[in-house]
Image (cartoon, helix red, strand yellow):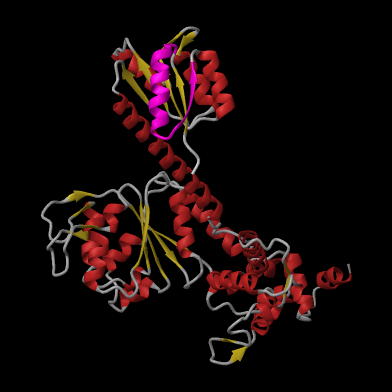
Amino acid sequence: MAKKRIIVGEDDRAIRGALVEFLESLDYEVTGAENCSSIREAFRESNPDAAILDYSLPDGTALDLLPHLKQSHPSVPLILLTGNGTVALAVQAIKEGAEQFLTKPVEMSAIAVVLERALKNQRNQQKQLAGKAREKRESVDPFVGASKAIREVAEQAQRLALSQCPVLIAGETGSGKGVLAKWLHDQSTRADEPFVDLNCAGLGRELLETELFGHEAGAFTGAVQRKLGLLEVAQRGTVFLDEIGDMDLQVQPKLLKILEEKRFRRLGDVQERQLDVRLIAASHENLAELVRKKKFRSDLYFRVSTVTIKVPALRERLEDIPILARHFFERCAADLGRQHLAISEQAMESLSGYSWPGNIRELKNVIERAVLLATSETIRPRDLHLEFRDSIAVDNGSELTLLEVQRQHIQKTLDAEQGNVARAATRLGVTRSTLYSKMKTFAIQTSRKEFAAHSGS
C-alpha cells in the first residue's frame, strides 16, 4: 500500500525537521516547506493526503493559504499550528476549512492522533462520496418508457415528490413498486436520511414486531442484546413496508398507533421515543378488498392510503417492452464488459410477444441472464430462455398467445371508437403511428379512409 503523503509547512527549521522525522517514523511520506510559496508548490507537485501548517509564515499566514488550498484540494485535511492562539482565530480558521487548530507547544503524540483521525474522516467521506456515486450510477429510473400509463404514474409521482403524506403503491409483483418507493424518497426533503425497507410477507407476528419496533435485552427468550427496530433506524427518513397486506392482524393496530401518535416503544422497554418518518407502503393485493374480507384493518388502510399510485403491469404498457429491454441490455452489457454484444431483432420480437407474468423484474432478469450466458456476439431468441413463452391465461379460462390478446384488444378498442384511430390510440395509450403499425401487423381493417391513406403512404 502506498504511503500517505503529508506536507509540513513550518518556517522554523528545527521544528520542521523534528516534525518530518517524527512523521516519517510513523511510515508517512513527508515533504517539508518553509513558506506560503513553497507550500503551494508542494501541493501542486505531491498531491498530498493531509497538511500540517504553521499559522505565521514569512510571506503570509495559513489563513491566506486556506481559500486557495481548499479550492484546489477540497478533500485534503489541513491542521494549523500557532504559538498565539485565540478563540476568535480558531473559529475563523475552522470556518475557512481547517480540520483542526492547535496551539503550540503540542506533543508529537497529540499531532499523530489528530492526523490519524483527520485521515480517517477523509477516508470515510471518500467512501460516502463513492457510495453515492455508485448508487446514482446503479439507480433505476422507474419511468422508463413512452406509454401513456407510465407517463401518468410519472406525473403523479412528481406531484408527490416533496410531500410528507403517506403513499400506497399498488401493483403486481415485479412491476417496480420498490423502485418507485426509493425514487419518492430520493426526490423528497428526506433524501439525505435513511431509506429502510421491510417486506412483510411471510413474517410471523413476533419477528415482524421485533423487526419494526426493536427490543431490549431480555424482552423475550433469545433476546440476549438490544436490537434497534427499523422504525428507529429510519428516524427522519423513509420507511417502506412492502406487501403490507400480508402484515399480521395483531401487529396492524400497533403500527397504526405509532403512525398516529408518532411515538413508539421497543419491546420490553418502558421509555417512549419520538418518531419522525415518512411511510410508503406497497401491496400486490387489493387492500380495499382485504378490508371487506376483514383481513386488513380499515383504520390502518385509510391511514396508509392517503395517496395511492397504481403501477401498471408490463402487459398494460406493451410499447414500453422494447424500450425497457434496450435500457436493461445496454446497462448490463456495460457492467459485464460486453459492450460489443448485440441483440437481434428476432430476440426483441420474442420479448415483445411474451406475456411477462413476472413484469419488469422478470424482463430485467431475462436480459441479464442472456447477456451473461450468450455464447456469440448476438443475443438470439434461444438465449432468452423465456419460461412461459407459448401462451397466457385470459379471464374466461382459455389459452391465447399474447399476440392474439393484443389483436383482440386493439380490435375491441377500435370497434368501441367506431373505427376512429386517433381516439383508439388515445384510449390504448399509444401514438397513432404505433397503432397503425400494429393494425398493419395484425391485418386489422377499418372502414375509415384515414387507415387506407396511412397504409399507402
Compare residues 268 and 47 and report the one nearer the observer.
47
Image coords of residue 177 (percent x, y): 47, 64
Residue at position x 83%, y 72% from top? Answer: 449
Question: Is the residue 161 above or below the residue 437 in the image?
Answer: above
Q: Residue furthest right?
A: 456
Image coords of residue 319 (percent x, y): 66, 68
Specify whether 225 is left or right of 180: left
Q: Residue furthest top?
A: 58
Asked whether residue 163 appears in the rendered view, the answer is: yes
Compare residues 100 and 96 and report the one nearer the observer.
100
Question: Is the residue 43 above or below the residue 236 in the image?
Answer: above
Q: Quadrant of residue 13?
A: top left
Question: Is the residue 353 above or below the residue 80 in the image?
Answer: below
Specify whether 207 is left or right of 337: left
Q: Quadrant of residue 204?
A: bottom left
Image coords of residue 208 (percent x, y): 26, 68
Question: Is the residue 399 above or below the residue 329 in the image?
Answer: below
Report the magenta residues as a range: 11-33
Asked whether residue 55 appears in the rendered view, the answer is: no
Compare residues 8 and 299 and report the one nearer the observer.
8
Compare residues 375 and 221 and report the one nearer the observer.
375
Residue at position x 48%, y 54% from top? Answer: 183
Magenta segment includes 257: no
Q: How many marks?
A: 0
Quarter of the figure that contains the C terminus: bottom right
Q: Quadrant of residue 346?
A: bottom right
Specify whether 6 is left or right of 303: right
Image coords of residue 220 (percent x, y): 13, 67
Residue at position x 78%, y 80% from top? Answer: 445
